[in-house]
Image (cartoon, coloured by chain):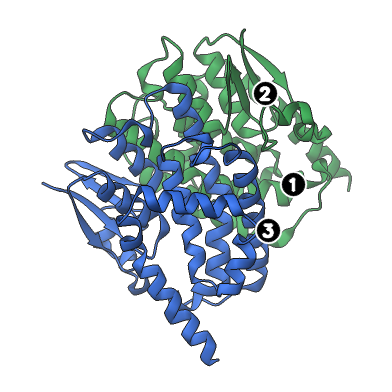
Chain colours: A blue, B green
Amino acid sequence: MKLRVYTDRMSQPSRAVIIFCKTNGIDFEEVRIDISKRQHLQPEFKAINPMGQVPALVDGKLKLFESHAILRYLSYAFPGIPDHWYPGDLSRRAKIESVLDWHHSNLRRGAAGYVLNKALAPALGLQLNPQAAAEAEQILCSSLSKIESIWLNGNGKFLLNSNQPSIADLSLVCEIMQLEVLDVNDRDRLLGPHKKINEWIDNVKMATRPHFEEVHAIIFKAAQKLHTRQAKL
Amino acid sequence: MKLRVYTDRMSQPSRAVIIFCKTNGIDFEEVRIDISKRQHLQPEFKAINPMGQVPALVDGKLKLFESHAILRYLSYAFPGIPDHWYPGDLSRRAKIESVLDWHHSNLRRGAAGYVLNKALAPALGLQLNPQAAAEAEQILCSSLSKIESIWLNGNGKFLLNSNQPSIADLSLVCEIMQLEVLDVNDRDRLLGPHKKINEWIDNVKMATRPHFEEVHAIIFKAAQKLHTRQAKL
């Protein structure tokens, strides 16, 4: 049975997994789970991922969730994946693990929390929460500064001064792309000061084209819809 | 040069790393970083971990932080570590990765947030924050329920129905042990309903003794101090 990947392309970790599969020529079937229609909470999907979150993967008997776990698994279980995505070299791999683990309580918590509470909540039937947005903004700004000063310190095109992308580059850049749904001025206020981060985003886009743009089309469309709605208010 | 591990034993991920090293006979030097004295923010330590967090590791040229990255690295870079800690089997390893990744935004966010805002803040020069504690409690309770119903579902002594512990067992149990600093009634209110979790904690203690108790001595001492102080108020 073909590898199945359960995704909602509005979810940033879903996009990272799809882009990884497409860029590396992994043969897979994409099963769409629409979070806005609460399909992630249906028993059929909870039989795949009892936590009710996308992305999830089914490969033969294996049912797997959490995007970083999925990206690692795809890197080592499928033949022919270039080593730079998840290196065999122990020290290099360990440094990438460090970025992946750091991501959860820092960039992800900040970016996802800010975007949800500042812009996306109504589309999910929730209320905007200015206080939660302000708290998330602090974490987001601190995370962006740290990425720029620590992991993009050097002349490499990617994190950890590398000239090839890893699964950490893909995961973190997809997270930052979620800021596209913000008001353009707000997004520019947050990302504008970070020249290296903007160059790095472009480098990840280039390394994964044309899939990066194709898989992100949904987020540009959602952004346009949100901005049109805001302009009418 | 001998492996150096930078820790504050009051930090739950520090304890997980020390217990792992001791249980597996890894020869290392423990360098204490006292967070309450803000040693983690000193330039000497930031040269090891620019994020200013413990635990961190130095092994030859490699400087590494994030406890899960450290536990993985120790598992595959040091000879003779039993396979069950971080299995070579791809599917089994992937499932453990899933638990490790889930931990960050769920059990860790809930438990660490609750303990800090309910009990530990004054010891770190911060104020208790009842609203943040209430939000963290929701995440903590939901996380404990999910661990019990999903990952401890089965007859195995450890997560994922296993009869041997993995690095995920060690990381998550050390996190839960942080609840020891709470008022005893509060701790029992949170953990009491979870019979399987309490059994699992005992199983991890047994599998790593006598190191588990020895490394946790500091937390029992801190708990006693906090409870005595509270009794006097």
Identify the residue under disc 2. B6
Identify the residue under disc 3. A138
Going by the numbered disc 2, the residue's amino acid type is: Tyr
Query: Element at badge 1?
Result: helix
Query: Tag on residue A167?
Result: none
* Residue at (54, 71) in percent of width and height: A182
| Residue B53 image-quadrant placement | top right
> Can you say whether A18 is above or below A87 in the image?
below
Where does residue B193 sit, x and y in percent of width and height?
Answer: 51, 48
State which chain disc 3 sits on: A
State which chain disc 2 sits on: B
* Residue at (40, 68) in percent of width and height: A219
Could you tell me if residue B145 is visible in this image?
Answer: no
> Looking at the image, is mark 2 or mark 1 nearer the viewer?
2
| Residue A46 image-quadrant placement | bottom left
Seen from the viewer's position, the closer of residues B75 and B230 is B75
Instruction: Check contact, mark 1 vs mark 3: CB within 8 A.
Output: no
State the count of labels: 3
Could you tell me if residue B84 is visible in this image?
Answer: yes
* Residue at (54, 55) in percent of width and height: A198
Q: Same chain, marks 1 and 3?
A: no
Query: Element at badge 3?
Result: helix
State which chain disc 1 sits on: B
Measure the alpha-carbon separation of dots 1 and 3: 24 Å
> Can you say whether A217 is above or below B15 in the image?
below
Query: Element at badge 2?
Result: strand
Q: Same chain, marks 2 and 1?
A: yes
Identify the residue under disc 1. B119
Looking at marks 2 and 1 on the same chain, the residue that comes earlier in the sequence is marked by 2
Q: Is residue A116 left or right of residue B15?
A: left
Going by the numbered disc 3, the residue's amino acid type is: Gln
